[in-house]
Amino acid sequence: MSATPRLPPVGDQDFSSSAWQQFFRDISVRVGVTGVVTWALVNKAGANITDIPSRNHGDLLNINTAGYTHLTATNHTDLTDGGDSTLHFHATDRALANITGLAANMGAFLADPTSAKLAATLTNETGTAGKVVFDTSPTITTPSVVSQTVSGTAGNLYAGIWTPTLTNGTNVAASTPHANSFFIRVGNIIHVGLSVEIDCTAAGAFDLQISLPVASDFAATDDASGVAHSVVGGGSVDAVVYADTTNNTLILSGVTVSTTNNLWMIEADYQIV
């Protein structure tokens, strides 16, 4: 038997030829009687595997690359048993009692998220502990607002300045609104304060229409109410304010004893309908 295996005699197609017969004998010798190519017959030149048949699982510990890591028996146990482990979290590890690094009282809140326990987690709150308030129908008891800037007209809590439009009614020859008439809106209630000068045609009853700072579709005369005061002929005179359901304005109605120009101071409230 030669030291180097023979190549099969491909050029000779007759398996009964002496070349093929010699090739078959060489193969038979190398395989042996068990039908297995022995490890000694494997050409291991250029490879570091000469002693792999004697290697066991523990001998592979040095195999540790960016993509593959060998586990020791201890590692395997840590990952597969049901106990605590430094390599992973079991159910007991996830328990709130075993989680560290939370702010004071946060664990209690996570376990039972009540308003009181949320308040206990806060460190910069003001006021006494109460309940969390959401934007739909909240109930707030005795709030104390130190200061508040109210601006814009998008909501239902704001104030403004307006110049009303006056429409002369019964027994009014001329009327002039003063500048800086004001109004305040709280919810659907409007409070107004204004001053107007009125010249009546004659002594007696008069009325004057006053436009609204915020529109309303009045359904009844008592959707608005107010009073007015003037000094006429050396005496004090009062008038009333109510809603005009036809024109959706305020009506100033009173009695005068003078046809001269008189200043009327008016305060009234009305609802947005």
Image (spheres, rainbow, N blue to C red):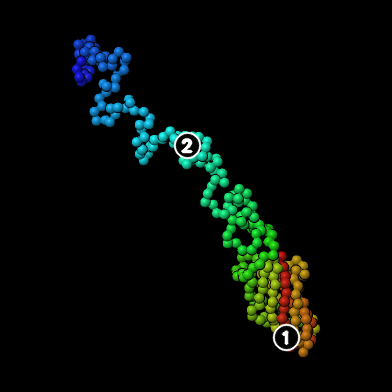
Q: Quadrant of residue 138?
A: bottom right
> Which residue corresponds to the image point at 69% horizontal and 78% vertical from the top-left?
194
Q: Residue at x 61, y 63 (%)?
A: 126
Q: Is residue 185 left or right of residue 257?
A: left
In the picture, measured across the screen, residue 88 lies left or right of residue 63, that is: right
Residue 264 in picture, x, y percent from top left: 72, 82
Q: Quadrant of residue 25?
A: top left
Q: Which residue is mark 1?
A: 262
**Residue 202 position (above or below residue 156):** below
Closer-to-camera residue (159/139): 139
Mark 1, secondary structure of its residue:
strand
Q: Which mark is residue 31?
A: none
Q: Amino acid at mark 1?
A: Asn
Tell me the CA gap for discs 1 and 2. 97 Å
Identity of the residue drawn at 32% across and 27% down: 52
* Residue type pointed to by label 2: Asp
**Closer to the observer: label 1 or label 2?**
2
Q: Quadrant of residue 123?
A: bottom right
**Residue 17 position within the rendered picture, expressed as x and y whole percent measured from the top left:** 21, 11
Going from N to C along the chain, the mark reached first, 1 or 2, is 2
Is 72 rendered above or below residue 115? Answer: above
Question: In percent of the image, x 62 and y 51: which residue is there?
Answer: 113
Quick check: can you spot residue 144?
yes
Total marks placed: 2
User: From the image, which quarter does the C terminus lie in?
Assistant: bottom right
- Which residue occupies the foreground of this view, 21 or 223? 21
Q: Rate crowding at label 2 as few (under 14), some (14 to 19) or many (20 or more) other CA atoms within 10 Å.
A: some
Image quadrant occupied by the N terminus: top left
Q: Is residue 247 visible?
A: no
Query: Which residue, given by chain and number where applicable, does mark 2 sit on?
Result: 78
Identify whether 108 is placed above or below 31.
Answer: below
Q: Crowdedness of circle 1 by 10 Å Cα count: few (<14), some, many (20+)?
A: some
